[in-house]
Amino acid sequence: MNITKPMKTIVSIAAVCAVLAFTGMSNANVSSEDNVETKSHKHYQKSERHHRGKDMMKKMSKYLGLSEEQKTQMKAIKTAAKEQDVSLRAEIKQFKEAEKLLLQAEKFDEQTYIALHDSYKETFAQMALAKAKTRNAMFNVLTPEQQVKWESKMEQRKSKMQRKGKNKKAKSEDVSES
């Protein structure tokens, strides 16, 4: 009886299975590495959100063609505003902590929340006023041409944000309809 023919078939089938198995494992490994890289990139993007202000200043400077004197004035305005906001930020932090406690309570107390919000109205107004003064001071550092350019850029950003908001709203409506 000829045993070599079935043996060759078994060996060749085993070899094909081994090749397929190793190919599958290597693809899975590459896929998991890509996934790790993607997750890391997403984390990087999230962590960088809090540092946008530095880049925004550079982008604004480049976009508007700010002179060195204007850059210095802008930095001085931002530094002064930051120093002024320290006490207000501490008060806002206290509000957020108290608000968090109310929101995490077993039963939401509407009157307590309204009272909390009312007690911080002065702080909110001061914060808004400081922000408006800072924006005004920075705007007045610009030349009239730069001001026009800045206004058009702000309009572009505003319309972009509105489109994003409409897209989010449309997506949420699509989800709720299904």
Image (cartoon, rainbow, N blue to C red):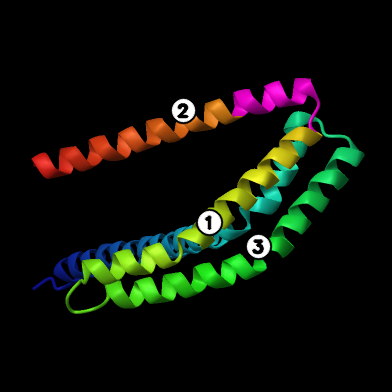
In the rendered image, the quadrant that contains the N terminus is bottom left
Q: Which residues are magenta?
A: 142-153
The alpha-carbon separation of the residues under discs 2 and 1 comes to 23 Å
The image position of residue 14, as x and y in percent, is 24, 69
The amino acid beneath tag 2 is Ser
Contact check, label 1 and label 3, Cβ < 8 Å: no
- The disc placed on residue 159 is 2
The amino acid beneath tag 1 is Gln
Give the secondary structure at mark 3: helix
In the rendered image, the quadrant that contains the C terminus is top left
Magenta-span inclusion, residue 152: yes
The amino acid beneath tag 3 is Asp
Left or right: where 72 falls relative to 50: right
Which residue shows up at 85% across the image and 45% down it? 73
Q: Quadrant of residue 175?
A: top left
Of the two numbered discs 2 and 1 in the rendering, the one whose residue sits closer to the viewer: 2
Work out whether residue 26 can be spotted. Answer: no
Give the crowd class for mark 3: few <14, some 14-19, many >=20 residues within 10 Å.
some
Which residue shows up at 73% across the image and 64% down it? 83
Q: Residue 82 or 167: which is nearer the viewer? A: 82
Work out whether residue 107 can be spotted. Answer: yes
The alpha-carbon separation of the residues under discs 3 and 2 comes to 29 Å
Q: Which residue is mark 3?
A: 85
The alpha-carbon separation of the residues under discs 1 and 3 comes to 27 Å
Give the secondary structure at mark 1: helix
The tag earlier along the polypeptide, 3 or 2, is: 3
The image position of residue 13, as x and y in percent, is 21, 64
Left or right: where 157 falls relative to 30: right
Q: Which residue is mark 1?
A: 45
Q: Is residue 18 above or below residue 128?
A: below
